[in-house]
């Protein structure tokens, strides 16, 4: 089922929780709503579920306007952050509850229960109470319960946030597998960008109630629309700079520690325009032998700090104007760099993104 | 510590000694507590059970045969059971909407109204009954009002025949509904809203959500309160005594106390009360066994409490104010009675006076009552404080293997009727040093202390449970002993709970009815409530002075309870549950 938000807003009194949201969620996709806490992602999901009313705008399932439709008639399955398992019902009863409300025949109910239990590998636990299950198992019961009613849209509200790191990884695979098997249009709310990148077919990033960018994970990572997204999705170096015109087919920028050149961008720039340049830590090429390279974007920096992680090495580099840049070296060669030495680096103009200046860069990570 | 108890060998280091001494103190205290509970809780009950089945030196069921052969006794038993049932049902009907409103809605003025809803609980029905009688007497205000407005032509006998039953039930309901209300509110508020939201998304209508999800989860909380209400209504002595409903178990027991040695049927009747209360308690335990569920972690966004405007809350205001007004009517009538002069054949008094308050200060009995009550209640409060904190600490921190048993034992008085305990004391301690017929002071203090101990333990335990053990362990790493840690770290942290517990213990002891009426047998040892009762029985202005004294008592109590409520907040409800 394709889901459409058409100019949807939500206010609580004077507080704007969601502002003029326009978004199409493709049928069969695993669509992520990603953002820091308080960005409006859960409110969006709850409006989709019919648990919150909209202040303005329409929500469509396919061509059907469901804005005024009660939750029960939308055909959604929901997994709450805390699972919301009924503690007095067994796993089987929890799953069957929704089926019994749909007045399905006993045979069909039995069949659906069996399917849901198998899909989530819970068959052994059918007669247990939720309190007798581990966190991961509880999470699967919540999933099974939502899936058993064969929802047209599956809604997941931070489903993994209550699990420990190891279990979270397992459950990611689990949910991805179930999504592949069922092909149910799924809307997944999270604040964990790794979850979104690794699982999502499309990711919508929200901030302070506004949708900032909606794109597949790779595009989001490589072509973030704003410095906020560049920083929220993965790690990056952000440098304030001024546009100084073109030079040898590249864009020339002046920043606090010299000049940087970037590949031509789609957006037009005017001379003297302030921008934010973004380049990922892994795009900084560090010459560990200290030899200066003949490059387009030479960086003269001091090695401030070095963190050795085996398969990689993280460097904190201090520029002439006291900015700190982060660089990552993968498969680091043996070297004798020590903290405080001057080293030569280079950034390929290919990898420098020119982004608009964001007024409150520091806020909201 | 005296030298006699130190058995530590000479070579023990100073550090070790400083640790084992307090440990020893702890165990001595624990032993003393257990002995006290055995002597003043287990033994008296045991004595009643023993005497109820004993003639000379062999087992008998004769007293029970006599009991059940007597129609008057049967009627009394039936009446009391019906009072219990009717009160519990009506309390439930009244409390359910109140609890739903409190747990689910927010509106201007809610805090104040929710607080006022609790006031009836602290107003002794015993005192209210005095004023209630004035209003509902043959020539009381209600009849006169109805006569004046032409609705009736002859006065209705409100307090005769069947109607006296309903008068008692009404007074009990107006006094006890807050207990059900508090427990239900807590149970409802404890249910994660997402549990119902989930059912909503699956298409469950509201009534099914209530039946399938809310009720099963709130059930044990409800029963915890309902049982207390049932047992208290069943065994309340003050109300039926003052309203004049003699055919009830508590009143019959009260009348039997003086000649219990000649008429052992009294033992059988008290024994029956014990059996009924423990039977009900056991039944409730069995039906709710394994039905208590820990709520899973809560969602972070959704809140069950809906904020609505004053206008939309209009029906709520109506219901709440009506309830509060009805519940306070008996006490208002006491207040009016206490300041009325020449109140005869008019709806409200013609003239008002403060004479009766002056009389309190000029006559012996009221002053003795106040003085004795302050002394008894104050002493019992101190005992509760020390013992209660100690027990709570041992139980919450699970310091001894039988902590659960100790906890259960301390909680028994909540379900154990005051008349039973008082009766047991008379049975056990007549002709001993503690003989209540000579001087009941010690027994009264002990009775007050034992019966209010649960409040103290619960208050302290609630605070301790929220105080992380690591705070104590941190102190222990510096070499502080357990007792020292308790004094310097733990007690200061839970002081709000302790003050609240003290206020409750004190207030409830001040207005204790059953123990006071039964144990205090001589004028000079009368506590406040018995003085009120004695004055009430006096002819002439006795009723008015009794009212004035009752108002003084209520004022004292109100201050205490409000203080406790401020200290405890929402946790207040946890004090009034049976398990």
Image (cartoon, coloured by chain):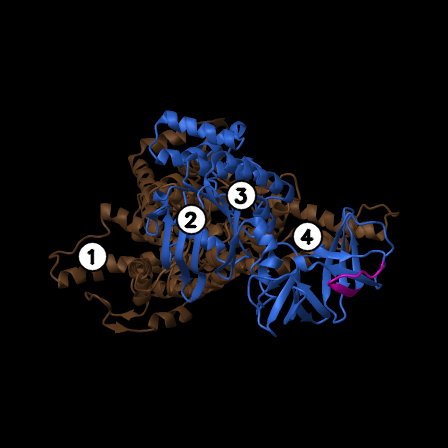
Chain colours: A blue, B brown
Q: Earlier in the sequence, mark 1 or mark 4?
A: 1
Circle 1 SS class:
loop
| Mark 4 lies on residue | B470
Q: Nearer the viewer, residue A310 or B82?
A: A310
* Label annotation for residue B188: 2
Q: Are marks 2 and 3 in contact (CB under 8 Å)?
A: no
Residue A148 lies in magenta, yes or no? no
Q: Nearer the viewer, residue B526 or B575?
A: B575
Give the number of the mark in front: 1 or 4: 4
Q: How far across and down, in percent of the image, does residue B543 sit?
A: 32, 62
Residue A292 lies in magenta, yes or no? yes
Give the number of the mark in front: 3 or 4: 4
| Mark 3 lies on residue | B41
Q: Does residue B531 appear in the picture of this structure?
A: no
Q: Are marks 2 and 4 on the same chain?
A: yes
Q: Chain of mark 3?
A: B
* Label annotation for residue B138: 1
Q: Chain of mark 4?
A: B
């Amino acid at each position: 089922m394709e889901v459409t938000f058409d100019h949807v807003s939500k206010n609580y009194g004077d507080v704007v929780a969601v502002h003029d949201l326009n978004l199409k969620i493709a049928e069969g996709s695993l669509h992520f709503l990603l953002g820091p806490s308080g960005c409006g992602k859960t409110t969006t999901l709850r409006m989709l579920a019919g648990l919150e009313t909209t202040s303005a705008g329409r929500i469509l399932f396919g061509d059907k306007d469901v804005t005024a439709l009660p939750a029960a008639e939308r055909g959604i399955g929901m997994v709450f952050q805390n699972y919301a398992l009924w503690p007095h019902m067994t796993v089987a009863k929890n799953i069957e509850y929704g089926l019994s409300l749909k007045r399905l025949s006993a045979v069909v109910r039995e069949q659906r229960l069996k399917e849901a239990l198998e899909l989530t590998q819970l068959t052994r636990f059918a007669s247990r109470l939720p309190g007798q299950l581990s966190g991961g198992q509880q999470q699967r019961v919540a999933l099974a319960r939502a899936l058993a009613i064969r929802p047209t849209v599956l809604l997941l509200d931070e489903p993994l946030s209550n699990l420990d790191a190891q279990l979270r990884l397992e459950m990611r695979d689990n949910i991805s597998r179930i999504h592949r098997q069922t092909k149910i249009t799924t809307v997944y709310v999270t604040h964990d960008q790794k979850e979104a990148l690794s699982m999502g077919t499309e990711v919508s990033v929200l901030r302070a109630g506004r949708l900032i960018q909606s794109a597949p994970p790779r595009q989001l990572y490589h072509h973030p629309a704003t410095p906020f997204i560049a920083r929220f999705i993965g790690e990056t170096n952000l440098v304030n700079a001024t546009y100084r015109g073109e030079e040898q087919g590249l864009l020339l920028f002046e920043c606090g520690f010299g000049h940087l050149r970037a590949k031509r961008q789609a957006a037009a720039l005017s001379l003297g325009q302030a921008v934010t340049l973004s380049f990922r830590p892994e795009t900084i090429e560090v010459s560990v032998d200290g030899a200066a390279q003949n490059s387009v974007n030479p960086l003269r920096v001091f090695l401030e700090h070095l963190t050795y992680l085996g398969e990689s090495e993280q460097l904190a580099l201090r520029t002439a104007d006291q900015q700190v840049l982060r660089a990552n070296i993968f498969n680091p060669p043996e070297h004798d760099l020590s903290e405080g030495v001057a080293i030569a680096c280079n950034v390929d103009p290919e990898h420098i993104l020119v982004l608009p200046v964001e007024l409150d860069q520091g806020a909201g990570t | 510590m005296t030298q006699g108890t130190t058995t530590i060998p000479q070579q023990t280091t100073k550090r070790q000694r400083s640790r084992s001494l307090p440990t020893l103190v702890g165990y001595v205290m624990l032993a003393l507590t257990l002995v006290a509970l055995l002597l003043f809780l287990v033994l008296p009950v045991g004595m009643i059970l023993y005497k109820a089945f004993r003639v000379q030196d062999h087992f008998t069921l004769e007293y029970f045969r006599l009991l059940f052969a007597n129609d008057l006794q049967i009627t009394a038993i039936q009446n009391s059971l019906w009072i219990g049932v009717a009160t519990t049902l009506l309390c439930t009907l009244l409390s359910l909407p109140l609890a739903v409103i409190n747990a689910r809605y927010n509106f201007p003025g809610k805090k104040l109204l929710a607080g006022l809803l609790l006031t009836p609980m602290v107003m002794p029905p015993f005192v209210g009954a005095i004023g209630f009688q004035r209003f509902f007497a043959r020539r009381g205000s209600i009849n006169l009002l109805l006569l004046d407005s032409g609705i009736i032509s002859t006065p209705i006998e409100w307090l005769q025949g069947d109607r006296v039953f309903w008068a008692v039930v009404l007074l009990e309901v107006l006094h006890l509904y807050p207990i059900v209300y508090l427990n239900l509110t807590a149970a409802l508020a404890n249910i994660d809203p997402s549990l119902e939201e989930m059912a909503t998304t699956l298409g469950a209508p509201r009534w099914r959500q209530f039946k399938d999800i809310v009720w099963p989860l709130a059930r044990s909380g409800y029963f915890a309160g309902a049982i207390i209400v049932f047992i208290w209504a069943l065994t309340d002595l003050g109300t039926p005594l003052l309203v004049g409903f003699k055919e009830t178990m508590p009143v019959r027991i009260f009348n039997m106390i003086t000649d219990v040695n000649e008429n052992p049927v009294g033992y059988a009747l008290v024994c029956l009360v014990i059996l009924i209360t423990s039977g009900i308690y056991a039944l409730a335990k069995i039906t709710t066994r394994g039905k208590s569920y820990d709520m899973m972690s809560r969602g972070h966004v959704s809140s069950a409490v809906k904020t609505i405007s004053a206008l939309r809350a209009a029906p709520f205001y109506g219901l709440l104010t009506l309830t509060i007004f009805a519940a306070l009517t008996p006490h208002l009538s006491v207040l009016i009675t206490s300041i009325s002069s020449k109140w005869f054949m008019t709806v409200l008094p013609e003239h008002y006076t403060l004479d009766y308050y002056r009389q309190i200060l000029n006559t012996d009995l009221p002053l003795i009552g106040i003085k004795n009550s302050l002394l008894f209640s104050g002493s019992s409060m101190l005992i509760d404080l020390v013992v209660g904190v100690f027990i709570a600490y041992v139980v919450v921190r699970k310091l001894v293997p039988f902590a659960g048993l100790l906890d259960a034992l301390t909680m028994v008085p909540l379900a154990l009727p005051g008349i039973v305990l008082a009766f047991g004391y008379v049975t056990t301690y007549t002709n001993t040093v503690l003989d209540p017929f000579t001087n009941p002071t010690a027994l009264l203090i002990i009775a007050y202390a034992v019966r209010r101990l649960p409040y103290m333990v619960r208050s302290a335990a609630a605070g301790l449970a929220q105080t992380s053990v690591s705070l104590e362990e941190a102190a222990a790493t510096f070499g502080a002993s357990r007792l020292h840690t308790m004094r310097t770290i733990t007690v200061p942290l839970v002081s709000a709970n302790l003050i609240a517990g003290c206020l409750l213990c004190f207030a409830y002891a001040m207005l204790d009815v059953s123990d006071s009426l039964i144990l205090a047998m001589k004028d000079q040892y009368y506590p406040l409530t018995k003085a009120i009762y004695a004055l009430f029985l006096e002819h002439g202005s006795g009723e008015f002075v009794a009212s004035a004294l009752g108002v003084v008592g209520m004022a004292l109590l109100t201050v205490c309870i409000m203080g406790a409520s401020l200290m405890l907040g929402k946790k207040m409800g946890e004090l009034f549950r049976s398990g």
